[in-house]
Amino acid sequence: MIGASKIKQYSNVLEKPLSKGKQEVSLSAFAFLFSELVQYNQTQVDNIAELERRLEDAGYAVGARCLELLCHREKVYHIIVKLCVMFMPFWLSQGNRRETRLLGILSFVHSTVWKVLFGKVADSLEKGTEHEDEYMISEKELLVNRFISIPKDMGTFNCGAFVAGIVRGVLDSAGFPAVVTAHFVPMEGQQRPRTTILIKFAEEVLRREARLG
């Protein structure tokens, strides 16, 4: 006699536990999809600045969803109504403490978020030397720029704008609004420049940081 199955049955897809699923995707598939994204948006704009803005907007949506997914996966204390998601700070898994510090959220982006997206931590995280509100995350070979050849007529176009949008989406959804931009920085002895994601936090974030001491 065959015994009854012990596998739990779920009547609703929303009741199913969140699975981590496959951790990697095909690089060639990603490269093709991203190329299509860039080419499509290129047909919708008249200048490079507008193209980078559209890529940043696309990345922003990815970043906001990435934060939400990571919070669920790590079982953090993160209960947010969707309509309020952009106005509530996110909760890390360090006890019941709400993350409100700059270094905490920057470390989260530099390590956890980067590992999920690119399989490694970012090459560096630095504080700006000229402005207190600026921080930089740098990559020698940012994935979205690795196989990109920029035509001369497109000047300094940087596909890193997509990643800048992801970072802004994560920060904004976590309660750390900022202006995030991507820049090429020449490296001595290297043919290709590194990509630096420049993060300029809003004044309200700096005031909160000052209050916390």
Image: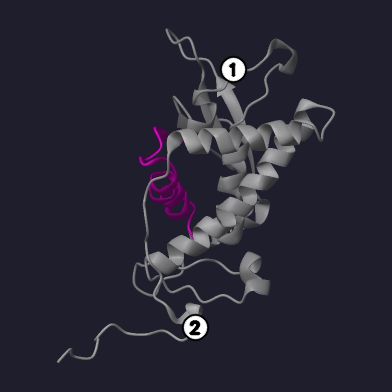
Q: Nearer the viewer, mark 1 or mark 2?
A: 2
User: Circle 1: is it few (<14), some (14-19), or many (20+) Cα within 10 Å?
Assistant: few
Give the quarter of the image for residue 50.
top right
Name the residue at 61% across, 56% down. Answer: 172
Looking at the rendered structure, the kind of residue marked 2 is Asn
Name the residue at 48% across, 30% down. Answer: 142
**Residue 14 located left or right of residue 201:** left
Looking at the rendered structure, the kind of residue marked 1 is Ser
Answer above or below: position of 99 versus 199: below
Answer above or below: position of 39 versus 170: above
Name the residue at 23% across, 91% down. Answer: 4
Name the residue at 60% across, 27% down. Answer: 183
For mark 1, give the secondary structure: loop
Range of residues picked out in magenta: 100-129
For mark 2, give the secondary structure: loop
Observer-nearest of 46 and 137: 46
Q: Which mark is residue 12?
A: 2
Question: Which tag, 1 or 2, sits closer to the chain's start?
Answer: 2
Q: Which mark is residue 18?
A: none
Asked whether the viewer can see residue 178, the reply is: no
Q: Is residue 117 magenta?
A: yes
- Which residue appears farthest toward the left when viewing the image? 1
Marks 1 and 2 in Cβ contact (< 8 Å): no
Q: Is residue 53 magenta?
A: no
The residue that disc 1 covers is: 149
Q: Position of residue 150 (x, y in %)?
A: 64, 17
**In what quadrant of the picture does the N terminus appear?**
bottom left
Q: Position of residue 146 (x, y in %)?
A: 49, 24
The type of colouring in the image is one colour
